[in-house]
Image (cartoon, rainbow, N blue to C red):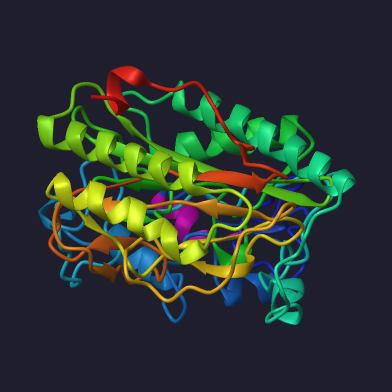
Amino acid sequence: MSAAGIPCQSSICPNGHPPSRLECPTCNKLGIKGSFFCGQECFKAGSSLSLSAGKTHKLIHELATRQPLLEDPNINKNGTYNPFGNFNFTGTLRPAYPLSPKRPVPEHIPRPDYAEDGMPISENRRAGQPIKILTAEEQEKIRTVCKLAREVLDIAASHIRPGITTDELDEIVHNATIERNAYPSTLNYCNFPKSVCTSINEVICHGIPDKRRLQEGDIINIDVTLYYDGYHGDLNETYPVGRIDDDSKKLLRTTRQSLDAAIALCKPGALFRDLGKAIEPIARANGCSVVRTYCGHGIHDLFHCAPNNIPHYAKNKAVGMMKPGMVFTIEPMINLGHWDLVHWPDDWTAATIDGKRSAQFEETLLITETSVEVLTAGKRRADLYDD
């Protein structure tokens, strides 16, 4: 079938997603959408519906032709499916594939070096360098992108409701980012397939937006990063979906308060290793634990850079002292249960090891001559995050 004018929908298109020339005939016959390719080479390499490396497009046909479909526990009534059926999930959340095609970014929008091939070459090249001190001009640039990132996060949060899919939230974030002539930093960063991370319930971080609909009582973290005028701005918050239970309210409140306590320590001369001393006691006092696998990081013209390791737990061995002109994130991840985690087979989604809920809050911070500036600051939800 001809598909002139439709961009190639392969997530790994080697040709830059030109107008497509053909459609998978089997998908067309089965009514599966999102299978237009720019040529035979691209079709053979895989498609936007492929599940992960090593799993072929033909598997989609097998899933679609299983009889009877609805007797398969990994296929839902709405046609979505769990591609990791044999994986031992720790909680009740399941992925809902197929993922939508990679969203296009207009050519006029400047993009980071990994946008095309997924490789953050600049980060790798500058690994091991000392923490960068931003000039006054550079500080203004990162102020601007952080303000834009806050706007985008607030727009996405305003759409949270039971019934919306995380893929729809990804589209909202993507479009709001493009409208600001910015690039969604997560898109193709180390091959991440989406423009935002959406982490629900027991997912700690790096959840991939898909076709699952939010349900009353869920909690969801939305992690937004924008790239604008050569600089990145990064923040996230965790939100309730409708009415949530008391444990979830406690978790959100504890996580926000732990971040605020860490920010209060930030000033010239403060040690990065001391931030965990402010965070962990608050978590423990509320019967929660602090994730140790992931941490805060430096950010400016690079998405992740020195200081690469800003732990959120006490008794850590992080090195470095805060100085005026440094920019970095603090982003504690707090669990209702154990601090440890497991990764889903998509190699991104990190979930709690015991299936209990997790929350996270993140701000990008600038150390000033006397104190700290929260570059991504927004309106505080006292009804949720304060006692």
Residue at position x 42%, y 38% from top?
237
Quadrant where the C terminus is found in the figure: top left
Image quadrant in which you'd find residue 254: top left
The picture places residue 384, in percent across and down from the top left corner, at 29, 24
In-front residue for pair 242/321: 321
Q: Is residue 133 left or right of residue 376?
A: right
Residue at position x 65%, y 30% from top?
176
The picture places residue 25, in percent across and down from the top left corner, at 52, 60
- Whether the magenta-drawn stretch holds residue 285 is answered as no
Main secondary-structure element of the magenta-colored stretch: helix
Residue at position x 29%, y 17% from top?
383
**Is 161 situated above or below 6?**
above
Residue at position x 30%, y 62% from top?
291
Q: Is residue 179 left or right of residue 88?
A: right
Residue 108 appears in the figure: no
Magenta range = 23-30
Image quadrant in which you'd find residue 172: top right
The picture places residue 269, in percent across and down from the top left corner, at 60, 58
**Is 52 situated above or below 19?**
below
Q: Is residue 73 left or right of residue 317?
A: left
Residue 32 appears in the figure: yes
